[in-house]
Image (spheres, coloured by chain):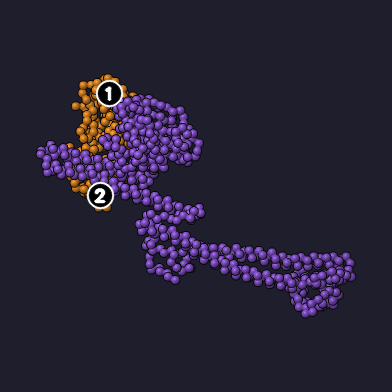
Chain colours: A orange, B purple
Amino acid sequence: MRILIVEDDPTVRSFIVRGLTETGHVADQADNGKDGLFLAVSEKFDVIILDRMLPGGIDGLKILETLRSQKNSTPVIVLSALGDVDDRVAGLKAGGDDYLTKPFAFSELLARVEALGRRGRSESAPQTRLEAGGLEMDLLSRSVKRDGQKIDLQPREFRLLEFLLRHTGQVVTRTMLLEGVWDYHFDPQTNVIDVHVSRLRQKVDKPFETALIHTVRNAGYMLRAD
Amino acid sequence: MQTDPSLPSSGPADTKIGSPRNFLALRSSGVRFAIVYALLFSLSAVLFLSVIWWGTVGLLERQVENSVVADLRGLSERWTEGGLPALTVAIEDRLEDNFDHDAIYLLMDPHNHRITGNLLVWPADVTASDAWYQLSIHRPGFHSVAQAQAQAQALTLPGGYRLLVGRDVRGRLMLRNLLADTLLWALAMITALALGGAVLVRSMLRRMIHSIAKTTSAIAHGDMSRRMPMRGRGDELDEVAEAINEMLERISRLMDGVKQVSNSIAHDLRTPITRARTRLEYAAHHAEDETALRQAIEHGVDDLDRITVVFDALLRITQIEAGSRRSAFACFDLVPVLEDIAELYEPVAEEKSIVLSLRLPAVLQFYGDRMMIQQAVSNLLDNALKYSPQDSTVTISAAAGANTGGNGIALSQEQIVTVAVTDQGIGMSWEELARAPERFFRADSARNTPGSGLGLALVQAIVQLHGGALRFSQRNPGLSAEMDLPLTASEVRNGRSEKKSEKKTFAVSHPEAGP
């Protein structure tokens, strides 16, 4: 994917650029709002990572609003040291697709960037079926089968599996699950997500030979058919 | 007079309310009040005096006129009945009956000769009928020097006879002059009173404002302990003082909060920062191989993550305590929110063989910040699960009540929604309970469990933002944490919180069994 990073702090910027390059992406960078806006409007990117507070008069939200007013729908993930709910709402309202508070783990950023990039590419018609490695999910009849064998899931387990299936082959972090499946925007102290995932594994993976749901160390989970 | 317009008043310290300013400085509200007072006072006095004037002098005048008119009518009737002789007799009778000697009659024949009456000559300026004349007349008889004032009306009779009827108004004029004098004096005194009152009003107002200004200026200079003096009369001034004191109370609470946070940062963030720093520095100098170095760095990152968590929690608490987050308040049904949280934690409970039980009404309308309530309940539940032994029960209950929330009947205008999380765990001692919501407080028995010591502080802040109270009560064994959240009727407009419909009790081993 081709990704633009607009971030004024050189350490954070080079850290992100290096991380993205290592994972096989092409990263362009800008260290101020003016250059960032210029790059964003003049070239085509799959995802833009935008710091909210930038020097040079044009801040992240301004860039975002300008892009959206020009009907540019490149997925944008807003990075910010402002972690308040109101700031998050302001970021999303300005047209951001995701919001990440500093400090963050690179794995979290990468997972979100890849999820956004995938969403930007596909998703034209609403899907009715999801499928990965013999696991089939029918979104209309809300039934799940693996290798032709029916699996009974409770509604929340269904939504958890659906989220994992929609991000097949991608890392999904615990925060992403909490936001995407439960719509909670705070951090429960106990790692409740792990318990839910292990319960889902009991039903989806345990009766079968190969595991589909994998734990990615220091990051989260990934559903992948080997 | 020291007026100093060149000096800009840059702060409360410069605004010397008590300094002798020009009395006529209209920008002083004291002066404006005083002027308005004086004007109103004078106006009402003038109005009052006018009424007196009209009621006395005016009344006398009207009486004279009425009696003259009646006299004239009577006499002209006599003329129609009996002609000249009857009229003459009538006039003479009336003059004889007139004890006050104030009546004036004069009847003249067509040749301008006097027929009868107590005037000698027809006054020169009386020409027309039906008009009032103020006459200076010479009267024979009673008054030797008979210069008198009279009010009179004339009537021309058929055949050229002329009749004049009037009243001597000398006495009345004297009364009128006397009254005028009196009223003028009264007006002068009233004006003096008004001015005096104005000065008094101004100085009272100045004193009032002065005490407020003195206190606020002292506070502006950093003396936060100062409070407005209350005089205990319950008047408007006390109300202002009370409002200001309340505001000061809140400001100092906020400032305490800031102070506490900076202390907390000093104590509780420095420790993990130091740990991380030591670990990294040690690794940089002494790590024997790359594995050890990597491990040290990973530990360092974990330490930093923990610091971030604490830092975020502290910021949130302070923000909530500052009361700036009421913008997200809305009406919502508490029951599904609580069921969702229970569903989130249910597998965690099951792992420890803890039964998570819900006691909720069918509907429970609530007004507040949904996300914060979620966070608060989740923190309480987190604690309960952390400190509960195996094979015990953790209960989440919610109910609306008038008072205690226990089994209250929803009748009073202020309802209370009580959300309680009850466990059968290790509990806390009374001393620990009292300190539980403090930031970074951790009970001795909890030292070895992971946690920041900020969970309950956050719950406390959230409950306070909703105007409620966080209570703990001992269960044997265990602990019940109850959030009493007030709910005024106006806030829950449409869906009034139901008087407890039948409670459904179910263990959430089948959380989706419900509707």
Q: Quick one: B250 or A191, which is closer to the camera?
A: B250
User: Could you say where residue B194 lies in the image, as x and y percent from the top left?
Assistant: 56, 66
Q: Quadrant of the N terminus of chain B?
A: bottom left
In which quadrant of the rendered view does residue B154 lie?
bottom right
Question: Mark 1 belongs to which amino acid?
Answer: Lys
Per the model, the C-alpha gap separating discs 2 and 1 is 48 Å
Give the secondary structure at mark 1: helix
The chain under label 2 reads A
Along the horizontal axis of the image, is B69 left or right of B195? right
Vertical relation: B187 (above or below) B223: below
Asked whether disc 2 touches disc 1, contact meaning CB atoms under 8 Å apart, the reply is no
In percent of the image, x 47 and y 62: which residue is there?
B206
Give the secondary structure at mark 2: loop
In percent of the image, x 85 and y 74: which residue is there?
B116
Badge 1 is on which residue?
A203
User: Could you say where residue B102 lies in the image, as x and y percent from the top left?
Assistant: 79, 71
Q: Quick one: B434 or B351, which is closer to the camera?
A: B434
User: Could you say where residue A199 lies in the image, as x and y percent from the top left?
Assistant: 28, 26
Badge 2 is on which residue?
A54
In percent of the image, x 28 and y 29: which residue is there?
A195
